[in-house]
Image (spheres, helix red, strand yellow):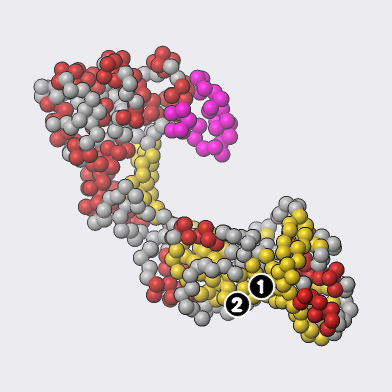
Amino acid sequence: MCGNIFSSDPTVTKEIVLLLTQDGLCPRCVLRFLGAGDVGLFRATSEELAQKVKSLVDDQDDIFSPLPCPACLGILQVYLEEGFLNRVVEAVRTSDHQFKNFICSLTTPVCSLLREHAILLLLKEKFKSLYEHREVEEISSVKDVWKWRSGPLLAAALDAPFELKSKFDIILNFTYEKSDKECTFLSYHSPEVFRKRKQQRSYGDTYTRANVARVLSKMTEGYFKRNYSLPKSNETNVCLCEDIRCVHDAVFVAGRYNKYSRTLSQTPWILDGGRKSESSVEEEICGPLKKKFLFTEQRFSSSGREDVDVRMLGKGRPFVVEMGDPHRVRLTPEDLAEIQQEINKSADVKVRDLQIVEKNDINKLKEGEIEKTKTYSALCWSKEPLSQEQLQKLQEVKDLVIYQKTPIRVLHRRPLATRERVVYSMSAEKVDDLHFTLNLLTQAGTYIKEFVHGDFGRTTPNLGTLTGVECDILELDVQSVELDWPPSLGDT
């Protein structure tokens, strides 16, 4: 009738039930500590489960307390009633998310670990042969039992299946105001575990499920029993659930961007609380995306980055936008094409190959970060005219290894180091006596500006040492980033 439980002896089972109900446990918690783990059993109503438990004690009446259960703090009672589940449904609808299925994540009061531990120790004491080697992990958890009952009910109301894994999460935060007070004795037993978290508020709560479970695993039964006893049922012995949130996993959109402005930063440029530029590549791209996906936060990543005064030409630089908690997720390739058209109305930024990608795919953006190559075109100045012979010699340079100390211009944000990079090839075309165009194929991560002007000798060799003439850079364009990702969609 109650599925597989720990005891096959009806007399022993009856004694266990009477002991647990004497302490005020609800029908679901009685069944949990009896060892029941059948999902179908726990999907029954509270009234049906109460009758099943009563049948184990010869149908005795009035064995259940009307007060909140001290084991689950009411989670398997009031929070499985229709009124609360309707609150959950309303919260989901109000959040206005698109989703095809869902999961539920519960956060329960940390003190529930102490209560379950106390009940299990009581059972080990009274029914040693049956519970001596039982661990709390063998007891169906409050979270699981709640989901077994509520999952199908919520699925019917939301017209979406309840799954073990889903990108859409309904988060329920159950709190109990006296939880920390119940845990206080743990700090006296293991002060080294809790002191740091208590002194440094940035660590969050002093008592967490992880550190409480760790201390309980090392604590003797005697110490625990001397310092803790299961609170009796009373009207205040119930947790609250005032925080119901809905969150959808991030959606990732990738593509390639071109930047045609020499005054546009890649990401918002804010200094001392003030903007240094009106917009950025990130904002030009993410604005139209946000209008369609309705996400709440964003993270823009790219394969390298160009300086504000550098253009990104050719087929563009690969990028990905991580869109956190999107409320719209059912976008088609046609929708992405419309977003791309909207972005491309900008005179400064254009994108191509805009597509939704999986989270695992974005690793390709950083794979081979140093191994990949980039091509550049730079308008340069020389202090003295360079002969055609001098320019021709540059074309003969192949696989030039250079050493670059962290440039002076970025020392304020990057550590001092010497980086070895390779200039694979170069060529130069004369513009006039003091100007020439330099074309370069280099290892990713090469500081091109510093290679040209030498950065006061911090980059060696440099263009000045190769030509014997002081040089500087006036304009720089990235012509290509040699990374075969994201896949081309045939955009022109």
Write down the quadrant of residue 36 in the picture: top left
Q: In the picture shown, does residue 163 fall above or below 122?
A: below
Label 1 neighbourhood size at 10 Å, few (<14), some (14-19), many (20+)?
Answer: many
Compared across the picture, whether 323 is left or right of 283 comes to left
Q: Are marks 1 and 2 in contact (CB under 8 Å)?
A: yes
Looking at the image, which residue is at 78% across and 57% down?
A: 405
- N-terminal-most mark, 1 or 2: 2
Where in the figure is residue 346, as x and y percent of width and height? 55, 77
Looking at the image, which residue is at 26% across and 53% down?
A: 161
Write down the quadrant of residue 477 in the picture: bottom right
- Label 1 and label 2: CA atoms lie apart by 10 Å
Where in the figure is residue 260, as x and y percent of width and height? 62, 77
Please name the predominant secondary structure of the magenta segment in the image: helix
Q: Amino acid at mark 2?
A: Gly
Residue 273 located within the stretch drawn in magenta: no
Compared across the picture, whether 299 is left or right of 407 comes to left
Give the number of the disc on residue 314: 2
Looking at the image, which residue is at 17% across and 31% down?
A: 2
Question: Which range of residues does the magenta coloring cover?
Answer: 187-214
Q: In the picture shown, does residue 99 fall above or below 224?
A: below
Quadrant showing the N terminus: top left
Mark 1 falls on what kind of element?
Answer: strand
Does residue 446 show up? yes
Q: Which residue is mark 1?
A: 375
Q: In the picture shown, does residue 96 fall above or below 234?
A: below
Compared across the picture, whether 419 is left or right of 352 comes to right
Does residue 265 show up? no
Where in the figure is residue 215, as x and y percent of width and height? 47, 25
